[in-house]
Amino acid sequence: MGIQFCKDGNFITIVIESVEETIEWQQKTKLVKKYTTKRDRAARKIQAWWRGTLVRRTLLHAALSAWIIQCWWRLMLARQLERKRRAALIAYAKKEWAVVKLQSLVRMWRIHWRYCQVLNAIYVIQCHWKCHTCQTCSLLRGHCVVTTTHLQFHIEVINP
C-alpha cells in the first residue's frame, strides 16, 4: 500500500495492493479560476439557478413520494389495527356466548332434574293414595315449587 504526492500538491496517487488485484486512484486538484467577464458571471448565475431549480424539483418529488408512502402506510396500520380489534371483539363475544350457553344448559338440566324428582314423588304419593281405603272420604290437593336449589312440595288431604 502506498500514497504518493506531487511537490506542487496538484497530483495525488493512492495505490492499494492486495493478493488479488491492484487498484490505483488518481485525484487532480484544480485551482479556481476567477471569471473576469460579465458574460461568464451571468452564465454562471443562470447555471447555478437552473441547478438549484433541478435540485429543488427533485427534492420536492422525493418529499411528495415519501409523504404518499407514509400516508399509505399509516392507512394500512390503521386497517390492520381495526382488523385486530374486530377479531379480538369477535373472539370475546364467542367466548361470552359459549359461557352463557353453557350456564343456561346447566340451569336447564338442574331444573329438569328437580322436576323429575317432583314427578317421581307425586307418582309415589298417588300410588300409595290409590291403595288407601278412605280414598272416597277425602280429597288430595298438592302444590309444588321448583327452584334451582330447593324443592317445595305441599300436599293437603281435605275431608269433605
Image (cartoon, helix red, strand yellow):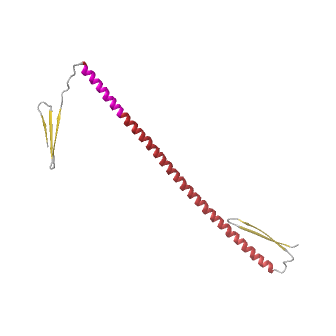
The image quarter containing residue 109 is: bottom right
Mainly helix, strand or loop, the magenta region? helix
**Residue 8: x, y in percent?**
12, 30
The quarter of the rendered structure image containing the C terminus is: bottom right
Q: Residue at x 80, y 79 (%)?
A: 130
Q: Is residue 129 magenta?
A: no
Please, which residue is most extreme toward the right here?
160
Q: Residue at x 35, y 34 (%)?
A: 58
**Residue 96: x, y in percent?**
58, 57
User: In this picture, is 104 found above or below 87?
Assistant: below
User: In this picture, is 23 found above or below 105?
Assistant: above
Q: Tell which of 144 and 78 is nearer to you.
A: 78
Q: Tell which of 159 and 62 is nearer to you.
A: 62
The quarter of the rendered structure image containing the N terminus is: top left
The image quarter containing residue 48 is: top left
Q: Is residue 96 left or right of residue 136?
A: left
Question: What's the magenta region?
Answer: 39-58
**Residue 38: x, y in percent?**
25, 18
Q: Is residue 124 left or right of residue 66?
A: right
